[in-house]
Image (cartoon, helix red, strand yellow):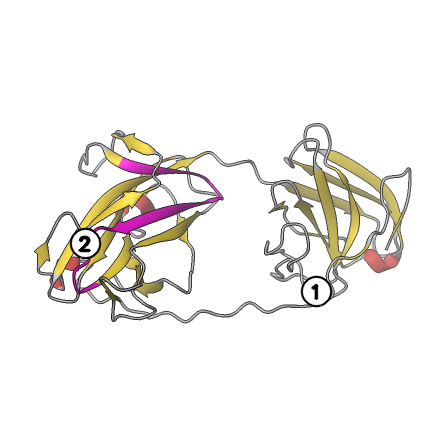
Amino acid sequence: MLNQRQGDLSLLGVLMLAVTSTPVLGFPDSAQFTNGDCFACHTSTQTGRMELMNFTGLVDPVERQGVPDQGELKYFTVQAGQAVGMTIHALNGHSKYAFQILGFDDPEVTRGGTLVYSDDPLWLAYRGSFKTYFCRADGGSNGYDWGTNDPTEVTYNIQVDAATPPGYYLMRSALAGQSGDWYQEELFYLEVTAGNPPVTLTVDATCPGGGPIVISWSNATPNSTVALLYARNTGNFPIPQGNPCAGTPLGLGTNQLQVAWQGGSGANGSRTLNANTGSGVCGGYFQLLDIASCRTSNVVRAQ
């Protein structure tokens, strides 16, 4: 596809041959509470039923305006654009119990940015008109049975949008009994730290007839390996198992998807490549894959 010039670009071959499909998860579309109030269904609060595990530490940050001071709470640290695992441990479930993660729609969270909660088939997502929360209860609403082989410790990975500003975000976890029964809630902070700047790709091609092409990028991992990918269409194809960064979703489709070039990212994560191309590259799409971090760049059309 790309003719080698000055040792910069060479065709390495097809990246993927097999196309895999991602299952679509179906979740309930309404929450089983009134106006976001869990105590509309749970009539009593009982302590000593659950605790948060694997937290970063304890912190008492300055609350945002309009949010009551919660004092010192456990917190979990995550970089914007990354995910953090939050673990809940059930100490005493009695009869039936379910794990819950709440607070995604609370003003404290939405005021500062958008948190992206990961769809996990083990966690049911209840998206009501007032609140969104995730519940793990044996794949349904029946709950786990205390004293059996059912889990007493579970982890939920909170994926944070790359655009979320740094700061502390107040959220909630809970262990809940059956409707009309007990409930315990624990507040916690999600500390979002500044993420890496996005990997940026530019393509200056000679189209439609073909000729010189200049490809540049910035903000990749310095002194590492990157792969320049090319396809005839856009999409959200996940890199299959057996390849570097398996599972990473691309912004490219599968039509003629291939590695156009692979090599060093540059001393500071920036580099410019010069080459000649034929007319066949025009109209196609490029994307850079940072193999060290598995981050991807923006998708650029050759035109």
Q: Is residue 94 magenta?
A: yes
- Can you identify the residue that label 2 sits on? 92
| Residue at the spot 38% in from the left edge and 44% down from the top edge | 113
Relative image position of residue 14 (x, y in whole percent) = 79, 59
- What residue did someone put label 1 on? 254
Q: Residue at x 85, y 44 (%)?
A: 9
Note whether residue 85 is visible. Answer: yes
The answer to which image quadrant residue 248 occupies is: bottom right
At label 1, the amino acid type is: Thr
Who is closer to the viewer here, 177 or 92?
92
Q: Are marks 1 and 2 in contact (CB under 8 Å)?
A: no
254 displayed left or right of 50: right
Residue type (three-letter) at the residue carrying disc 2: Asn
Label 2 neighbour load within 10 Å: few <14, some 14-19, many 20+ = some
Dot 1 or dot 2, earlier in sequence: 2
Residue 161, image x and y in percent?
45, 47
In-front residue for pair 1/242: 242
Helix, strand or loop under label 1: loop
- Residue 294 among magenta residues: no
Crowding at label 1, few (<14), some or many (≥20) Cα neighbours within 10 Å?
Answer: many
Task: Please provide the residue range marked out in magenta.
Answer: 74-96
- Please provide percent x and percent y for residue 162: 48, 43
Q: Is 215 located above or below residue 302 in the figure?
A: above
Quadrant for residue 70, please give it: top left
Marks 1 and 2 sit apart, C-alpha to C-alpha, by 50 Å
